[in-house]
Amino acid sequence: MRVICKEDYDSASRAAADIIAAQILLKKDSRIGLATGSTPVGAYKRLVEKYEANELDFSDVITANLDEYRGLPKTHDQSYRYFMDTNLFDHVNIKKENTYVPDGMEQDAKKACSDYDRILEEKIGRFDLQLLGIGGDGHIGFNEPSDHFCVNTQCVKLEEQTIKDNARLFFSGDESAVPKEAYTMGIGFIMRSKRIILMATGKGKRDIVEKAFSGPVTPYVPASVLQLHPDVILVGDFDAIPETLRQG
Ligand code: F6R
């Protein structure tokens, strides 16, 4: 694993955006896996700036997101489709039909998951680059701690901590407003990516980053599986990345 540790959130966001931009410059039709949440917002901003400066062309890029709340329509301002549109897709020349997010409005969970797995197989195959954040309980996508690593897209019950963490983003700030379930890409497809960037910033992530990358590989800390991937880049700031993990 490589570690890029920057002084603050802005520089970490720049570093992550530079890696994504380099990937697109290297391969115009890159398949890129994307995350939502507060961590990647700065990186998406930087990518938009690069596009506006004519440094990047998204016209052949194909993306697929990690997850979506079950029961939220695309138009809901906390849906992950809405997040992606407003933070990135609406501001660059990506073709919307080349951007995939699980369908939160498909009530039949089995169908929602198998539909998304089919899209991933047919349209992506394997990501050139997957961007991840990390939850306070070690989740990646919405793969919560469990007794096994889930391979395929699944419907998950969100952990109390995840619901609490995400309540701040909902209008009322109220936990009851947060959906209790989500569809998430499985860990199998994430691990199939050629390269993975995990972004972690802020003091609140320090303990879980340490557990995930210095502790044992266990499905009770889902991100720990990344220790087994041959090309992971941990990008973060001094607050989130413990000294023991920093290099150079
Ligand atoms: C969202 C996702 C989640 C987040 C994680 C961290 O698509 O994949 O795993 O990355 O919950 O969220 P933030 O960045 O808000 O701390």
Image (cartoon, rainbow, N blue to C red):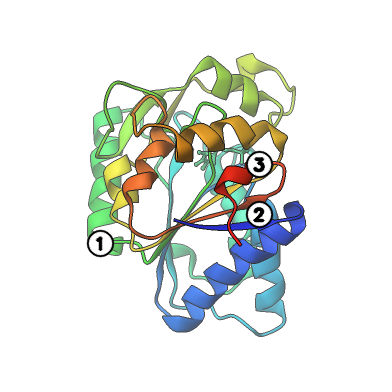
Residue behind mark 2: 86
In front of the other: 79 or 200: 200
Which residue is most to the bottom? 54
Q: CA distance from mark 1 to mark 2?
A: 26 Å
Would you identify the image quadrant in which residue 160 lies? top right
Residue, disc 1: 125
Locate residue 220 relative to residue 79 in the image: left or right: left
Pointer 1 or 3: first along the chain: 1
Q: Quadrant of ligand 1?
A: top right
Point out the tag, 2 or 3, that comes first from the N-terminus. 2
Q: Residue 197, position in %: x, y?
A: 49, 56
- Ligand 1 within 8 Å of disc 3? The answer is no
Q: Is residue 71 left or right of residue 37?
A: left
* Rendered view: 198 above or below 16: above
Q: Amino acid at mark 1?
A: Gly
Q: Secondary structure at mark 3?
A: loop
Asked whether the viewer can see residue 241, the reply is: no
Q: CA distance from mark 2 to mark 3?
A: 27 Å
- The residue sitting at 63% across, 28% down in the picture is 166
Q: Amino acid at mark 2?
A: Thr
Relative image position of residue 89 (x, y in whole percent): 58, 62
State the residue in front, 86 or 54: 54
Badge nearest the viewer, 1 or 2: 1
Q: Secondary structure at mark 2?
A: helix
Q: Determine which residue is flagged by label 3.
A: 240
Q: Is residue 115 above or below residue 71?
A: below
* Residue at 29% across, 63% down: 123
